[in-house]
Amino acid sequence: MGVQSGSLFFFVCRAVVLVVIMFALPSPVRARTDVGVSLLYLSGTHYESHSSVYEQFVAPLLKLDTGGSRVEFAAEGIPALGITSSGSSATFGTATTSLGFGDATLRYALDAHGRYWLGAGTIIIDQQTTFTQATSTSPYLTESSRVSGARYEGRLRFPVSRDAVILDFAGSPNLWGTYFAGSCNHCYPAEFSTPEHGSMTDASAMFEIPRGRSIWDFGVRFINYSATFTHYNILADRNTGGGVEVEYRYLVAR
């Protein structure tokens, strides 16, 4: 059971372009590099056209930031490591989902103090779900999808003594990919696929505490993702949720 490789190729190409631009800039612009990991907990609701189910998601996110006071490259992601188990319902049954995503953004500070930032980049979302039995909406036991597209960001950073409050808002208005379904012995076709189009918003509020080479962030994050089957113009799925995020980064160069 595979997922579309084209969206991964374009995501990698866009990310490489951002990295090339970053390292083509003068070295003082990229005077700082830090790497780290955050623990993200989200709870929310997964909607489809016939029903909905409550979900919880816990996963580590790998982080990379490099740049200076005016230009910054940031990337985060998980390589399909997050696992969620949905509750049993008449529509969805019991399912296990592997969810991975990555995003990369090049940001620019609009002021010399680095308080107001705008950015643009790319994002990819990959999910694979296995059902224990056929459901009332689909006889297929596996489904997967991969979507990718452009990502746009706005950031506000307000100093509080040695610390800072950081507000982020990101939008991906055009995500494109393909939905696959399979593992059905009595279905025709045995494997089914159809294109889908989605969009996503991602907002967070974090309190940042830098101490020496260590940087701690604590806050909340909210995500809203929806997709439709383009050939049928019906809802594929929608996921809305919020939760807490704790992040640690280590300054490897400055």
Image: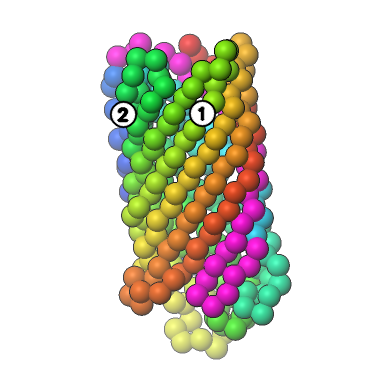
| Above or below: residue 159 compared with residue 6 | above
Residue 145 visible in the displayed image = yes
Magenta span main SS = strand
**What's the distance in space between the residues labelled 1 and 2, CA to CA?**
27 Å
104 sits to left or right of 136:
left
| Above or below: residue 34 compared with residue 219 | above
Q: Amino acid at mark 2?
A: Val
Seen at 57% across and 31% down, the residue is: 206
For label 2, the residue is: 20
- Residue found at the far right of this picture: 88
Seen at 65% across and 60% down, the residue is: 55
Image spot of residue 184 (x, y percent): 56, 81
Seen at 28% across and 21% down, the residue is: 24
For label 1, the residue is: 166
| Above or below: residue 192 compared with residue 245 | below
**Along the line of sight, the residue nearer the viewer: 142 or 51:** 51
> Secondary structure beneath disc 1?
strand
**Along the line of sight, the residue nearer the viewer: 37 or 167:** 167
Lower sequence index among marks 1 and 2: 2
> Secondary structure beneath disc 2?
helix
Q: Nearer the viewer, mark 1 or mark 2?
A: 1
Seen at 55% across and 35% down, the residue is: 205
Task: Please state the extent of the stretch shown in magenta in the rendering.
Answer: 26-54
Image spot of residue 175 (x, y percent): 37, 55
Check residue 10 for magenta coloring.
no
Residue 132 visible in the displayed image = no
Check residue 32 for magenta coloring.
yes
